[in-house]
Image (spheres, rainbow, N blue to C red):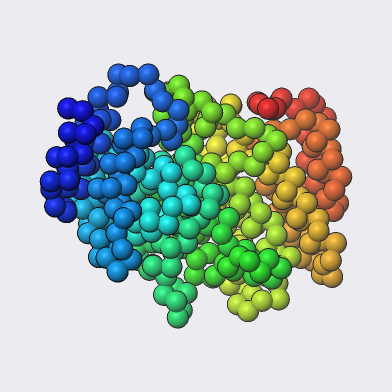
């Protein structure tokens, strides 16, 4: 059947039958293209795009009809994804791969993912997790969705996170890992001078610590997913191999590292200081446990979990805070935490760099006993080479 005939038949149907038929067409189109040469990531045929615009997102709708339509579409998509297990990942990707900058798609996407969180829809959240990795967990579109989900499941009056979020790792650990990665980009610590970002709350930090204490490897789940996909599908190579010259946003590890090392210098004077200190000590412990578990990830020898760019950013931020600190004790605590992370990351291969780069990092840090041990051990032999200097 040619494109004109398909459009004619779809236009004879009323909503929601027209939308269901359009989804069926896209699903069959995906199935037909399985044996064809793979297209570039994110490429969508003009005709498929026209089908989505007219019969799914209905871009021509007037504003007064938009809200009602979006609610219908979200419910319809939830039901459709649940009954089409073989193609739901591909359909989700086709619908939302180009959502960034499209207000209609982003509105539907945020509400759809938020509802999937509330309904504990694992299949849909797994598709959302793949979309997050494809877009990049620090991208504007992903941060928007995560902020909307957090808003929907946090009590604004008390900042308390709901039990729905507590259960999220059991519903989809892959989504939770990417969700956590985005959270480390969205939030700043109390005492930071970054007014454009929301401040991390005690309740959210409690939730994160609870997640990671129950399963420290939660922060590495995205790597397991990427590596397993790579074993089957060669195009994932670009997603698997990371560059030491660029930040690595495949996991929340770099963001958690920045929180742990900056926190003692920032939160010592804020309200609930003792509670913050307890939670941050817990976060430091689970971060170290996660680094210890890193070698168990398939293909870890070819990965830069913490890149040189990540470490230099963390050290740079840390040094800037130390330079204005008036409390030697907090400087010592913060230095110990950073050096602990450095030591474990070097020992497990989670961080690799040249001897010259490592020497430069150590020289920038305040002197302490643990740092001298690291220098003695790791600067006395040739370090493993970085995997990819591109």
Left or right: 1 as drawn, with respect to 238: left
Q: Nearer the viewer, residue 61 or 125?
A: 61
Q: Nearer the viewer, residue 263 or 95?
A: 95
Left or right: 261 as drawn, with respect to 224: right
Q: Nearer the viewer, residue 1 or 388?
A: 1
Q: Residue at x 80, y 26 (%)?
A: 381
Q: Residue at x 69, y 71 (%)?
A: 191
Q: Quadrant of residue 46?
A: top left
Q: Position of residue 100 (x, y in %)?
A: 47, 49
Left or right: 65 as drawn, with respect to 168: left
| Residue 204 seen in render | yes
Q: Quadrant of residue 225?
A: top left
Q: Position of residue 164 (x, y in %)?
A: 34, 63
Left or right: 123 as drawn, with respect to 180: left
| Residue 110 seen in render | no
Q: Nearer the viewer, residue 371 or 61?
A: 61
Q: Residue at x 79, y 37 (%)?
A: 358
Q: Residue at x 57, y 40 (%)?
A: 292
Q: Position of residue 62 (x, y in %)?
A: 31, 63
């Amino acid at each position: 059947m040619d494109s004109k005939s398909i459009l004619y038949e779809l236009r004879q149907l009323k909503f929601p039958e027209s939308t269901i038929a359009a989804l069926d067409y896209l699903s069959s189109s995906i199935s037909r293209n399985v044996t064809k040469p793979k297209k570039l990531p994110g490429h969508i045929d003009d005709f498929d795009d026209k089908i989505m615009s007219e019969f799914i997102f209905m871009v021509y709708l007037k504003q007064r009809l938009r809200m009602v339509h979006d609610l219908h579409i979200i419910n319809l998509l939830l039901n459709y994804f649940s009954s089409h297990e073989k193609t739901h990942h591909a359909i989700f990707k086709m619908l939302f791969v180009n959502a960034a900058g499209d207000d209609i798609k982003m509105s539907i996407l945020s509400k759809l993912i938020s509802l999937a969180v509330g309904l504990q829809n694992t299949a849909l959240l797994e598709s959302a997790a793949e979309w997050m990795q494809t877009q990049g967990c620090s991208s504007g579109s992903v941060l928007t969705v995560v902020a909307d989900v957090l808003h929907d499941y946090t009590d604004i009056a008390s900042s308390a996170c709901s039990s729905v979020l507590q259960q999220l790792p059991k519903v989809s650990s892959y989504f939770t890992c990417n969700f956590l990665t985005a959270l480390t980009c969205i939030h700043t610590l109390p005492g930071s001078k970054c007014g454009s970002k929301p401040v991390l709350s005690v309740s959210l930090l409690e939730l994160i610590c609870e997640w990671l204490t129950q399963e420290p490897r939660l922060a590495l789940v995205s790597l397991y997913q990427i590596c397993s996909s790579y074993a089957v599908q060669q195009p994932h190579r670009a997603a698997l191999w990371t560059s030491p010259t660029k930040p690595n946003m495949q996991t929340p590890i770099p963001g958690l590292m920045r929180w742990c090392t900056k926190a003692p210098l920032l939160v010592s004077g804020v309200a609930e200081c003792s509670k913050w200190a307890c939670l941050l000590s817990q976060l430091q412990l689970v971060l170290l446990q996660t680094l210890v578990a890193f070698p168990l990830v398939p293909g870890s020898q070819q990965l830069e979990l913490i890149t040189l760019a990540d470490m230099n950013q963390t050290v740079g931020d840390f040094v800037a805070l130390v330079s204005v600190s008036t409390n030697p004790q907090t400087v010592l605590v913060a230095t110990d935490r950073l050096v602990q992370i450095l030591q474990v990351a070097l020992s497990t291969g989670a961080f690799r760099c040249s001897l010259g780069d490592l020497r430069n990092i150590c020289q920038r840090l305040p002197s302490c006993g643990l740092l001298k041990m690291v220098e003695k051990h790791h600067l006395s032999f040739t370090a493993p080479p970085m995997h990819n200097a591109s």
